[in-house]
């Protein structure tokens, strides 16, 4: 177990930012800490790194206690804060050299490593430019370069795709995913569920400081959404289609929206759906299988919680 | 806030990374625009003061064994003496170097990134403080050599060894005094998130001691030891109370220390009784060792005040959340 917390709690006055969190993350996992703004993700991360003290509960990262053994812990754990900043008047290289010195790396080793991480993050060409001229995406990559500089065993990333355009975000997520291949354990937080769901082995959904759902994305989808297969179709006219589709034994739910219909089914029944549509005399424009989305899992879960209340 | 017994048994040295921080901050200071401005400002005033001082000296005093020290203290209207310039500018220079030490890291979003490296907060604070102090020491030393050199050019008399000793002690006292203001700036940089507010607060403290503390000390002394026309000792008591109160200000401590160090004729600080003067040749200079002993309480006072301010900044900083 690389990261393990028990009853981890953080209170700011009356506000309970994190409430009795039990987290267990295995070596080599990519774990997504997901939840809306203010749900306690950053607070959890800060406690894992010993940057803020827990009000109650215990934390072990790589078997170390962050408040008691912060130095050996921070030597092996890289952290990319949500709004990462650098010294603007210094170059990318100088910023990394400072980090290397803080980590006590010998000069020769740090030169080799800085070169390597800048190359890897695609920043080799701008290495000697002041950071003030860097775009948000470049800064984020420089942040990841800094994290990799100490060759960490665990990497903690807070909102790594924040402020990146969709393409840059995907590219950045690929870089994160490549860490897994090196055996690095990754913990990342995000409120953009659909964006990170593809790279996470497991996710934990936060709500008001509590971990309300946890597991693999497909597992959660299965559990919360019932049917794992979601079929989207566009057809005209729609009259009478809903009833006919609902009559199919595998279909558990039919929804209409602006663009067409959405079915939930226990099996991939696209051929049957196509036949039904044609038999009804409608024209079929498109038919596709949708990946279950975490956003939906999340939304549905809270719908159910609210209904239950 | 609950006490944390964990803090008592921390792993490793709190100084890990101190030198990395020190050299980075030092390089920042030395290359900053702020520093250029300070240098120009102090340089002009120093040259002006020394020139004016040397002019007065050449006209008046012919043979003085402490010519260099006179260069430091001689003033010619409308220019104040070199020492007066220093005691005015150095607090401002110290504040200029320290007012954004910690809040600057917050505002640049670098603090959490730096503290995620294997160092303690101690190293960051000490590194910044020592870098500021070393930078100020560097300015001071450069200025000192400049003044000694200029003095040589204008007056043509090389200083004696005792004079150099006194001048170096004066330098030390000035550094301790500067350290106090660096400490004040460090505290405000932890207290206030905005750099402008922090600078303003530190300058307000400086103004308070420079302008108002004298008046307040007077009022306090009158309240504590009222003057009684029928009690001859009451006047002495009031003077002593006034001295005690005014010594709470670093400015007073510094003024007294350099007075003793730069003026070998001074044998005692504060009210002097006739009995204390018995056996002492009036006007004969005090040896360096004696002057040093006389200034010792003031010097330690300044150093203690610096450490106290640093400790305050330290405690405040340890309790700060890393994020805004
Ligand atoms: N220093 C503080 N003092 C008081 N309350 C705080 C402090 N820091 C955080 N909080 C509160 O703790 C809760 C959790 O905040 P946290 O930053 O951990 O959320 P988050 O999940 O990271 O949100 P975001 O997606 O906006 O980054 C919030 O309600 C916040 O208001
Ligand atoms: Mg956050």
Image: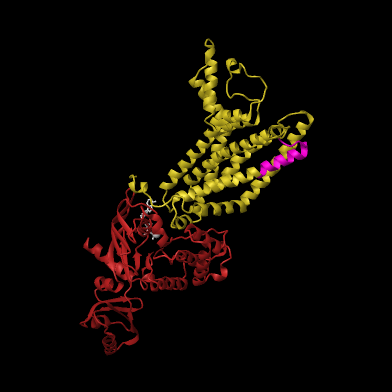
- Can you say which quadrant of the picture contains the C terminus of chain A? bottom left
What color scheme is it?
by chain
Q: Quadrant of ligand 1?
A: bottom left
Whole-percent x, y for residue A227 in the image = 25, 76
Whole-percent x, y for residue A180 in the image = 38, 72
Q: Is residue B242 visible?
A: yes
Whole-percent x, y for residue A17 in the image = 33, 54
Residue A250: quadrant of the picture: bottom left
Residue A49: quadrant of the picture: bottom left
- Can you say which quadrant of the picture contains the N terminus of chain A? bottom left
Classify B189 as above or below A284.
above
Which span of residues is magenta-colored? B142-159
Q: Is residue B150 left or right of residue A260?
A: right
Classify A177 as above or below B231.
below
The residue positioned 28% from the left and 65% from the top of the image is A213
Q: Is residue A4 left or right of residue A168?
A: left
| Closer to the camera in the image, B6 or A56 | B6
Residue A205: quadrant of the picture: bottom left
The residue positioned 46% from the left and 60% from the top of the image is A83
Q: Judge whether residue B147 is colored magenta.
A: yes
User: How many numbered marks appear?
Assistant: 0
| Chain B: colour as depicted | yellow
Classify A64 as above or below B4.
below
| Closer to the camera in the image, A213 or B291 | B291
Q: Judge whether residue A8 is colored magenta.
A: no
Whole-percent x, y for residue A272 in the image = 26, 87
Q: Is residue B87 visible?
A: no
Q: Main secondary structure of the magenta part?
A: helix
| Closer to the camera in the image, B278 or B86 | B278
Q: Which chain is red?
A: A
| Closer to the camera in the image, B1 or A240 | B1
Spot the residue most to the top: B230
């Amino acid at each position: 177990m690389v990261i393990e917390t028990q009853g981890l709690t953080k209170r700011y006055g009356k506000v309970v930012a994190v409430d009795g969190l039990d987290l267990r993350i295995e070596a080599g996992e990519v774990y997504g800490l997901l939840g809306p703004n203010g749900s306690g993700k950053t607070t959890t991360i800060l406690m894992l790194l010993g940057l803020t003290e827990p009000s109650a509960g215990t934390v072990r990262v790589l078997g170390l206690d962050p408040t008691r053994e912060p130095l050996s812990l921070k030597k092996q754990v890289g952290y990319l804060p949500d709004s990462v900043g650098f010294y603007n008047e210094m170059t990318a290289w100088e910023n990394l050299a400072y980090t290397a010195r803080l980590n006590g790396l010998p000069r020769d080793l740090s030169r080799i490593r800085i070169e390597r991480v800048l190359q890897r993050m695609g920043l080799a060409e701008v290495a000697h430019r002041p950071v003030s001229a860097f775009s948000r995406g470049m800064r984020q990559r420089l942040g990841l370069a800094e994290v990799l500089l100490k060759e960490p065993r665990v990497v903690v990333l807070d909102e790594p795709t924040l402020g990146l355009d969709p393409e840059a975000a995907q590219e950045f997520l690929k870089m994160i995913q490549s860490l897994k291949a090196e055996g690095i354990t990754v913990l990342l937080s995000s409120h953009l569920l659909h964006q990170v769901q593809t790279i996470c082995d497991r996710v934990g959904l936060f709500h008001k400081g509590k971990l309300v759902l946890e597991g693999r994305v497909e597992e959660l989808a299965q559990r919360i959404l019932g049917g794992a297969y979601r079929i989207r179709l566009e057809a005209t006219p729609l009259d009478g289609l809903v009833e006919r589709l609902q009559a199919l034994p595998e279909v558990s739910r039919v929804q209409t929206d602006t663009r067409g219909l959405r079915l939930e089914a226990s099996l991939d029944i696209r051929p049957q759906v196509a036949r039904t549509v044609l038999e009804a005399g409608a024209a079929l424009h498109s038919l596709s299988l949708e990946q279950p989305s975490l956003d939906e899992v999340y939304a549905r879960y809270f719908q159910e919680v609210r209904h239950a209340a | 806030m609950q006490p944390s017994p964990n803090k008592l048994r921390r792993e490793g040295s709190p100084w890990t990374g101190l030198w990395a921080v020190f050299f980075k901050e030092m390089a920042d200071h030395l290359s900053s625009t702020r520093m250029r401005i300070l240098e120009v400002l102090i340089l002009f005033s120093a040259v002006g003061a020394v020139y004016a001082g040397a002019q007065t000296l050449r006209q008046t005093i012919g043979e003085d064994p402490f010519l260099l020290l006179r260069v430091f203290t001689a003033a010619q209207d409308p220019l104040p003496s070199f020492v007066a310039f220093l005691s005015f500018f150095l607090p401002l220079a110290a504040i200029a170097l320290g007012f954004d030490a910690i809040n600057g890291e917050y505002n640049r979003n670098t603090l959490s990134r730096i503290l995620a490296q294997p160092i303690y907060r101690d190293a960051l604070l000490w590194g910044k403080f020592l870098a500021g102090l070393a930078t100020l020491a560097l300015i001071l030393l450069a200025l000192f050599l400049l003044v000694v050199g200029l003095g040589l050019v204008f007056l043509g008399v090389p200083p004696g060894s005792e004079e150099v000793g006194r001048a170096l002690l004066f330098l030390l006292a000035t550094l301790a005094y500067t350290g106090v203001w660096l400490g004040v700036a460090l505290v405000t940089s932890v207290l206030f998130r905005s750099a402008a507010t922090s600078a303003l607060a530190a300058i307000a403290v400086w103004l308070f001691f420079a302008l108002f503390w004298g008046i307040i000390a007077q009022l306090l002394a009158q309240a504590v030891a009222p003057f009684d026309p029928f009690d001859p000792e009451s006047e002495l008591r009031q003077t002593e109370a006034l001295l005690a109160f005014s010594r709470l200000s670093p400015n007073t401590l510094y003024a007294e220390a350099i007075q003793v160090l730069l003026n070998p004729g001074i044998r005692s600080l504060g009210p002097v009784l006739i009995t204390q003067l018995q056996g002492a040749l009036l006007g004969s200079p005090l040896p360096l060792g004696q002057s040093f002993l006389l200034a010792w309480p003031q010097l330690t006072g300044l150093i203690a005040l610096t450490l106290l301010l640093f400790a305050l900044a330290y405690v405040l900083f340890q309790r700060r959340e890393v994020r805004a």
